[in-house]
């Protein structure tokens, strides 16, 4: 991500704010007001600096820091087999030592999310007669 070097939120200005607080003992509230940022943002930068020095003040990704978990092929086969034995998602997750959300998402994608999906659909048996009207019954 590219930030202009003189922007309020540039890395240089973050470091300047932190150093003025640490070296010159200026109050964070005054520094935040001078920089035109909120007090919570100033404290966030101060905490980042204390945890990782200057390198912690650079911009971070806004996306997720971790990837979604997936089941390996062996676990997936076990999950499908257990589901066909009518095990609940919670029990499958416990037996596989995998997160419930991962098991649920994976089995739902395979069409096995609901127990009613495990049973084959019953075909509708329709009456078929040779002549139209053969099945009419009238009570008088």
Image (cartoon, rainbow, N blue to C red):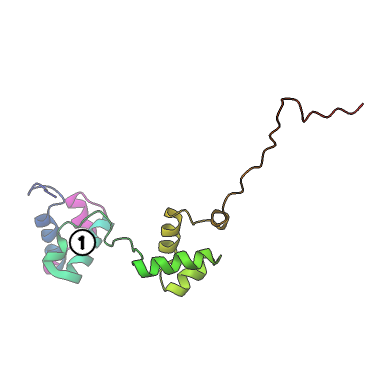
Q: Nearer the viewer, residue 98 or 122?
A: 122
Number of other residues with Cα within 10 Å of mark 1, as a class: few under 14, some 14 to 19, many 20 or more: some
Q: Which of 68 and 30 is in front in this view?
A: 68
The quadrant in which residue 53 appears is: bottom left
Residue 45 in the figure: left or right of residue 88: left
The quadrant in which residue 61 appears is: bottom left
- Magenta span dominant secondary structure: helix
Q: What stretch is highlighted in magenta?
A: 23-38
From the top left corner, tell me how far across and down residue 45 is, in percent: 20, 61
Q: Quadrant of the C terminus?
A: top right
Q: Which residue is drawn at 68% across and 34% down?
A: 128
Q: Residue at x 9, y 56 (%)?
A: 12
The residue that mark 1 highlights is: 45
Q: How many labels does the image show?
A: 1
From the top left corner, tell me how far across and down residue 76 is, in percent: 39, 65
Q: Which residue is drawn at 43% across and 69% down?
A: 78
From the top left corner, tell me how far across and down residue 118 is, in percent: 54, 57
Q: Which of 126 and 68 is in front in this view?
A: 126
Q: Is residue 36 magenta?
A: yes
Q: What element carries label 1?
A: helix
Q: Which residue lies furthest to the right in this view?
A: 140
Q: Which residue lies furthest to the left in this view?
A: 5
Q: Nearer the viewer, residue 99 or 120?
A: 120
From the top left corner, tell me how far across and down residue 87 is, in percent: 54, 67
């Amino acid at each position: 991500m590219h930030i202009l070097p003189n922007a309020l939120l540039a890395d240089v200005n973050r470091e300047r704010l932190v150093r003025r607080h640490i070296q010159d003992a200026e109050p964070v509230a005054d520094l935040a007001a001078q920089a035109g940022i909120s007090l919570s943002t100033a404290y966030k930068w101060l905490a980042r600096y204390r945890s990782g020095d200057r390198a912690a003040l650079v911009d971070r990704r806004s996306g997720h820091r971790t990837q979604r978990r997936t089941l390996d092929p062996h676990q997936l086969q076990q999950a499908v087999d257990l589901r066909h034995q009518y095990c609940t998602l919670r029990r499958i997750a416990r037996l596989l030592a995998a997160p419930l959300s991962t098991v649920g998402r994976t089995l739902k994608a395979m069409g096995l999310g609901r127990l009613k999906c495990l049973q084959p659909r019953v075909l509708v048996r329709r009456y078929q007669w040779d002549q139209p009207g053969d099945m009419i019954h009238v009570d008088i």
